[in-house]
Amino acid sequence: MASGAQLVITQTLVAALAVGSIAGLPAGAELQQKTVDAFDRYVGSSEARMDTEERSEDGFLYIDGLAPAQRAAAERQARGAVPFMARVPTNDGGRKIDVPDGLIHHWVGVTFMPGVTTDQAVALMQAYDRHADVFKPVIVRSRLLSHDGDRFRFYLRFYVKKVIGVTTDTEHEAVFGRPSAERAFSRLRSTRIAEVEDAGTPSERQKPVGGGHGFLWRLNTYWRFAERDGGTWVQCESITLTRDIPTGLGWLIGRFVTEIPKESLTFTLSTARKALVKG
Protein backbone atom coordinates (compact mmCIF):
# COMPACT_ATOMS: atom_id res chain seq x y z
CA MET A 1 0.00 0.00 0.00
CA ALA A 2 1.36 3.43 -0.93
CA SER A 3 2.34 5.72 1.92
CA GLY A 4 0.72 9.14 2.41
CA ALA A 5 3.81 10.86 1.01
CA GLN A 6 3.87 8.59 -2.05
CA LEU A 7 0.19 9.26 -2.66
CA VAL A 8 0.71 13.04 -2.54
CA ILE A 9 3.65 12.78 -4.96
CA THR A 10 1.61 10.62 -7.34
CA GLN A 11 -1.34 13.03 -7.28
CA THR A 12 0.99 15.97 -7.89
CA LEU A 13 2.57 14.25 -10.89
CA VAL A 14 -0.83 13.39 -12.33
CA ALA A 15 -1.98 17.00 -11.92
CA ALA A 16 1.17 18.32 -13.56
CA LEU A 17 0.81 15.97 -16.51
CA ALA A 18 -2.86 16.88 -16.90
CA VAL A 19 -2.16 20.62 -16.81
CA GLY A 20 0.59 20.14 -19.35
CA SER A 21 -1.80 18.32 -21.67
CA ILE A 22 -4.63 20.86 -21.55
CA ALA A 23 -3.17 23.06 -24.27
CA GLY A 24 -3.05 20.09 -26.60
CA LEU A 25 -6.65 19.02 -26.19
CA PRO A 26 -8.46 18.56 -29.51
CA ALA A 27 -11.93 19.81 -30.50
CA GLY A 28 -13.56 21.74 -27.69
CA ALA A 29 -10.50 23.82 -26.81
CA GLU A 30 -10.84 25.75 -30.08
CA LEU A 31 -13.90 27.98 -30.43
CA GLN A 32 -16.21 26.72 -33.19
CA GLN A 33 -18.66 28.81 -35.22
CA LYS A 34 -21.54 26.54 -34.16
CA THR A 35 -20.70 27.37 -30.54
CA VAL A 36 -20.69 31.11 -31.27
CA ASP A 37 -24.01 30.84 -33.10
CA ALA A 38 -25.62 29.07 -30.14
CA PHE A 39 -24.27 31.67 -27.71
CA ASP A 40 -25.57 34.52 -29.90
CA ARG A 41 -28.99 32.88 -30.01
CA TYR A 42 -28.97 32.54 -26.22
CA VAL A 43 -27.96 36.18 -25.79
CA GLY A 44 -30.63 37.32 -28.25
CA SER A 45 -33.36 35.55 -26.29
CA SER A 46 -32.02 36.94 -23.01
CA GLU A 47 -31.79 40.51 -24.29
CA ALA A 48 -35.34 40.35 -25.65
CA ARG A 49 -36.51 39.78 -22.07
CA MET A 50 -34.22 42.57 -20.83
CA ASP A 51 -35.72 45.05 -23.31
CA THR A 52 -38.99 44.89 -21.40
CA GLU A 53 -37.44 44.90 -17.92
CA GLU A 54 -35.24 47.95 -18.58
CA ARG A 55 -38.35 50.02 -19.41
CA SER A 56 -40.32 48.74 -16.43
CA GLU A 57 -40.54 50.49 -13.07
CA ASP A 58 -42.10 47.55 -11.21
CA GLY A 59 -39.95 44.80 -12.77
CA PHE A 60 -36.67 46.65 -13.24
CA LEU A 61 -34.71 44.40 -10.87
CA TYR A 62 -34.67 40.60 -10.76
CA ILE A 63 -35.88 40.59 -7.15
CA ASP A 64 -38.92 42.73 -8.10
CA GLY A 65 -40.42 39.71 -9.85
CA LEU A 66 -40.06 37.29 -6.95
CA ALA A 67 -42.92 36.13 -4.74
CA PRO A 68 -43.30 38.29 -1.59
CA ALA A 69 -41.56 35.89 0.80
CA GLN A 70 -38.74 35.20 -1.67
CA ARG A 71 -38.33 38.88 -2.37
CA ALA A 72 -38.08 39.71 1.33
CA ALA A 73 -35.39 37.04 1.78
CA ALA A 74 -33.52 38.25 -1.31
CA GLU A 75 -33.57 41.85 -0.10
CA ARG A 76 -32.24 40.83 3.33
CA GLN A 77 -29.39 38.98 1.61
CA ALA A 78 -28.65 41.89 -0.73
CA ARG A 79 -28.39 44.32 2.19
CA GLY A 80 -25.51 42.33 3.66
CA ALA A 81 -21.87 42.09 2.69
CA VAL A 82 -22.50 39.14 0.34
CA PRO A 83 -24.87 39.88 -2.57
CA PHE A 84 -27.98 37.90 -3.40
CA MET A 85 -27.17 35.47 -6.23
CA ALA A 86 -29.35 33.36 -8.50
CA ARG A 87 -28.87 31.25 -11.60
CA VAL A 88 -30.89 32.48 -14.59
CA PRO A 89 -32.11 30.07 -17.30
CA THR A 90 -32.95 31.29 -20.81
CA ASN A 91 -34.98 29.22 -23.25
CA ASP A 92 -35.89 29.81 -26.89
CA GLY A 93 -39.63 29.33 -27.34
CA GLY A 94 -39.75 27.19 -24.21
CA ARG A 95 -36.95 24.92 -25.41
CA LYS A 96 -33.45 24.66 -23.99
CA ILE A 97 -30.73 26.17 -26.17
CA ASP A 98 -28.05 23.57 -26.80
CA VAL A 99 -24.47 24.85 -27.04
CA PRO A 100 -22.25 22.35 -28.88
CA ASP A 101 -18.69 22.16 -27.50
CA GLY A 102 -19.41 24.95 -25.02
CA LEU A 103 -21.07 25.89 -21.75
CA ILE A 104 -23.09 29.01 -20.94
CA HIS A 105 -22.97 30.28 -17.36
CA HIS A 106 -25.81 32.70 -16.57
CA TRP A 107 -26.04 34.39 -13.16
CA VAL A 108 -27.62 37.47 -11.65
CA GLY A 109 -26.51 39.22 -8.47
CA VAL A 110 -28.04 42.08 -6.50
CA THR A 111 -26.54 44.22 -3.74
CA PHE A 112 -27.87 47.23 -1.85
CA MET A 113 -25.63 50.25 -1.29
CA PRO A 114 -27.04 52.44 1.53
CA GLY A 115 -26.40 56.17 1.18
CA VAL A 116 -25.19 55.79 -2.41
CA THR A 117 -26.83 57.51 -5.38
CA THR A 118 -27.34 56.08 -8.85
CA ASP A 119 -24.99 58.76 -10.18
CA GLN A 120 -22.22 57.58 -7.84
CA ALA A 121 -22.68 53.91 -8.74
CA VAL A 122 -22.72 54.61 -12.47
CA ALA A 123 -19.66 56.84 -12.18
CA LEU A 124 -17.70 54.02 -10.52
CA MET A 125 -18.56 51.58 -13.28
CA GLN A 126 -17.65 54.12 -15.98
CA ALA A 127 -14.24 54.84 -14.44
CA TYR A 128 -12.59 52.12 -16.53
CA ASP A 129 -9.08 53.52 -16.07
CA ARG A 130 -9.50 52.84 -12.32
CA HIS A 131 -10.88 49.31 -12.47
CA ALA A 132 -7.47 47.69 -11.96
CA ASP A 133 -7.22 49.58 -8.64
CA VAL A 134 -10.81 49.02 -7.52
CA PHE A 135 -11.24 45.38 -8.57
CA LYS A 136 -7.77 43.99 -7.96
CA PRO A 137 -6.48 41.28 -7.95
CA VAL A 138 -9.04 39.90 -10.45
CA ILE A 139 -8.49 42.86 -12.79
CA VAL A 140 -4.76 43.32 -13.31
CA ARG A 141 -4.83 46.09 -15.93
CA SER A 142 -7.55 48.43 -17.19
CA ARG A 143 -7.67 51.20 -19.77
CA LEU A 144 -10.37 53.32 -21.37
CA LEU A 145 -9.96 53.05 -25.15
CA SER A 146 -12.64 55.49 -26.31
CA HIS A 147 -15.69 57.35 -25.05
CA ASP A 148 -18.52 58.81 -27.12
CA GLY A 149 -21.56 59.91 -25.14
CA ASP A 150 -23.10 56.86 -23.47
CA ARG A 151 -20.81 54.45 -25.36
CA PHE A 152 -17.47 53.28 -23.92
CA ARG A 153 -14.76 50.98 -25.25
CA PHE A 154 -12.24 49.63 -22.74
CA TYR A 155 -9.54 47.02 -22.11
CA LEU A 156 -9.26 44.71 -19.08
CA ARG A 157 -6.73 42.06 -18.16
CA PHE A 158 -8.23 39.38 -15.90
CA TYR A 159 -6.43 36.91 -13.70
CA VAL A 160 -8.40 34.14 -12.03
CA LYS A 161 -7.21 31.04 -10.24
CA LYS A 162 -8.92 27.88 -9.00
CA VAL A 163 -6.44 24.99 -9.20
CA ILE A 164 -5.37 26.58 -12.52
CA GLY A 165 -4.35 30.22 -12.96
CA VAL A 166 -5.49 31.88 -16.19
CA THR A 167 -4.79 35.37 -17.56
CA THR A 168 -6.88 36.88 -20.36
CA ASP A 169 -6.65 40.16 -22.28
CA THR A 170 -10.14 41.41 -23.10
CA GLU A 171 -11.79 44.32 -24.88
CA HIS A 172 -15.38 45.40 -24.31
CA GLU A 173 -18.02 47.85 -25.44
CA ALA A 174 -20.49 49.32 -22.95
CA VAL A 175 -23.66 51.26 -23.71
CA PHE A 176 -25.50 53.06 -20.89
CA GLY A 177 -29.14 54.10 -20.70
CA ARG A 178 -31.04 56.34 -18.28
CA PRO A 179 -34.82 55.76 -18.25
CA SER A 180 -35.24 58.13 -15.26
CA ALA A 181 -33.22 60.16 -12.76
CA GLU A 182 -33.36 57.27 -10.27
CA ARG A 183 -32.71 54.40 -12.67
CA ALA A 184 -29.90 53.52 -15.07
CA PHE A 185 -28.71 50.44 -16.93
CA SER A 186 -25.81 49.34 -19.11
CA ARG A 187 -25.02 46.49 -21.47
CA LEU A 188 -21.40 45.37 -21.74
CA ARG A 189 -20.32 42.94 -24.44
CA SER A 190 -16.87 41.50 -24.95
CA THR A 191 -15.47 42.26 -28.41
CA ARG A 192 -12.14 40.47 -28.12
CA ILE A 193 -10.80 37.85 -25.67
CA ALA A 194 -7.33 36.30 -25.88
CA GLU A 195 -5.65 34.05 -23.34
CA VAL A 196 -2.17 35.17 -22.27
CA GLU A 197 0.65 32.67 -21.95
CA ASP A 198 3.49 33.32 -19.46
CA ALA A 199 1.79 36.51 -18.29
CA GLY A 200 4.10 39.01 -16.60
CA THR A 201 7.29 37.44 -17.95
CA PRO A 202 9.60 38.47 -20.83
CA SER A 203 8.15 35.60 -22.90
CA GLU A 204 4.55 36.73 -22.43
CA ARG A 205 2.38 36.33 -25.53
CA GLN A 206 -1.27 36.24 -26.49
CA LYS A 207 -2.71 33.02 -27.82
CA PRO A 208 -4.94 33.23 -30.91
CA VAL A 209 -8.46 34.50 -30.24
CA GLY A 210 -10.71 31.47 -29.77
CA GLY A 211 -7.75 29.27 -28.92
CA GLY A 212 -5.95 28.48 -25.69
CA HIS A 213 -7.68 26.55 -22.93
CA GLY A 214 -11.13 27.95 -23.69
CA PHE A 215 -11.82 29.09 -20.13
CA LEU A 216 -13.30 32.40 -21.32
CA TRP A 217 -14.64 32.85 -24.85
CA ARG A 218 -17.39 35.44 -24.31
CA LEU A 219 -18.39 37.69 -21.40
CA ASN A 220 -21.52 39.85 -21.41
CA THR A 221 -22.60 41.77 -18.33
CA TYR A 222 -25.81 43.74 -17.85
CA TRP A 223 -25.96 46.31 -15.04
CA ARG A 224 -28.96 48.04 -13.47
CA PHE A 225 -29.05 50.78 -10.86
CA ALA A 226 -32.21 51.73 -8.95
CA GLU A 227 -32.08 54.52 -6.34
CA ARG A 228 -34.67 53.94 -3.63
CA ASP A 229 -35.02 52.95 0.04
CA GLY A 230 -32.27 55.35 1.11
CA GLY A 231 -29.63 54.02 -1.25
CA THR A 232 -29.13 52.30 -4.59
CA TRP A 233 -29.87 48.73 -5.58
CA VAL A 234 -27.18 47.50 -7.96
CA GLN A 235 -27.76 44.45 -10.13
CA CYS A 236 -25.40 42.66 -12.48
CA GLU A 237 -26.42 39.83 -14.78
CA SER A 238 -23.58 37.93 -16.46
CA ILE A 239 -23.66 35.57 -19.43
CA THR A 240 -20.36 33.77 -19.95
CA LEU A 241 -19.29 31.28 -22.60
CA THR A 242 -16.56 28.73 -21.87
CA ARG A 243 -15.40 25.43 -23.30
CA ASP A 244 -17.18 22.29 -22.24
CA ILE A 245 -15.56 19.91 -19.76
CA PRO A 246 -13.47 17.24 -21.52
CA THR A 247 -13.85 13.63 -20.47
CA GLY A 248 -11.39 12.70 -17.76
CA LEU A 249 -10.46 16.26 -16.78
CA GLY A 250 -13.57 17.24 -14.86
CA TRP A 251 -11.72 16.94 -11.57
CA LEU A 252 -9.12 19.44 -12.81
CA ILE A 253 -10.99 22.10 -14.80
CA GLY A 254 -14.63 21.32 -14.03
CA ARG A 255 -14.71 23.53 -10.93
CA PHE A 256 -12.87 26.28 -12.80
CA VAL A 257 -15.36 26.65 -15.62
CA THR A 258 -18.46 26.09 -13.47
CA GLU A 259 -17.61 28.02 -10.28
CA ILE A 260 -15.52 30.96 -11.51
CA PRO A 261 -18.43 32.81 -13.25
CA LYS A 262 -20.50 32.93 -10.06
CA GLU A 263 -17.52 33.72 -7.83
CA SER A 264 -16.31 36.48 -10.16
CA LEU A 265 -19.74 38.12 -10.17
CA THR A 266 -19.98 37.87 -6.38
CA PHE A 267 -16.54 39.45 -6.05
CA THR A 268 -17.37 42.28 -8.46
CA LEU A 269 -20.58 43.28 -6.68
CA SER A 270 -19.08 42.95 -3.19
CA THR A 271 -16.02 44.99 -4.17
CA ALA A 272 -18.10 47.73 -5.80
CA ARG A 273 -20.17 47.96 -2.61
CA LYS A 274 -17.05 48.30 -0.46
CA ALA A 275 -15.73 51.04 -2.74
CA LEU A 276 -18.88 53.15 -2.40
CA VAL A 277 -20.46 52.44 0.98
CA LYS A 278 -18.93 54.44 3.81
CA GLY A 279 -18.42 52.88 7.21
Image (spheres, grey):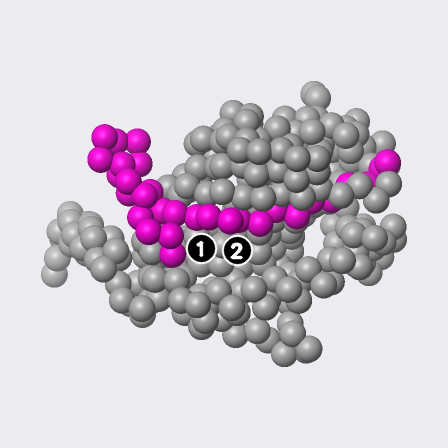
Disc 1, SS:
loop
Q: x and y percent of residue 213 in the render?
A: 33, 55
- Nearer to me, 65 or 79: 65
Tell me where the magenta segment starts and ends, as one range: 181-210
Q: x and y percent of residue 87 in the render?
A: 62, 59
Specify the quadrant that holds the C terminus: top right
Quadrant of the image occupied by residue 148: top right
Residue beneath the point at 70% across and 21% down: 278
Q: In this figure, which residue is indicated by the disc labeled 2?
A: 240
**Residue 217 — which label?**
1
**Residue 170 visible, this orientation:** yes
Q: What is the three-letter code of the residue carrying label 1? A: Trp
As drawn, 144 above or below 72: above
Q: x and y percent of residue 142 in the render?
A: 49, 31
As drawn, 184 above or below 230: below
Q: Is residue 202 magenta?
A: yes
Q: Is residue 161 magenta?
A: no
Q: Locate residue 269 relative to residue 77 in the image: left or right.
A: left
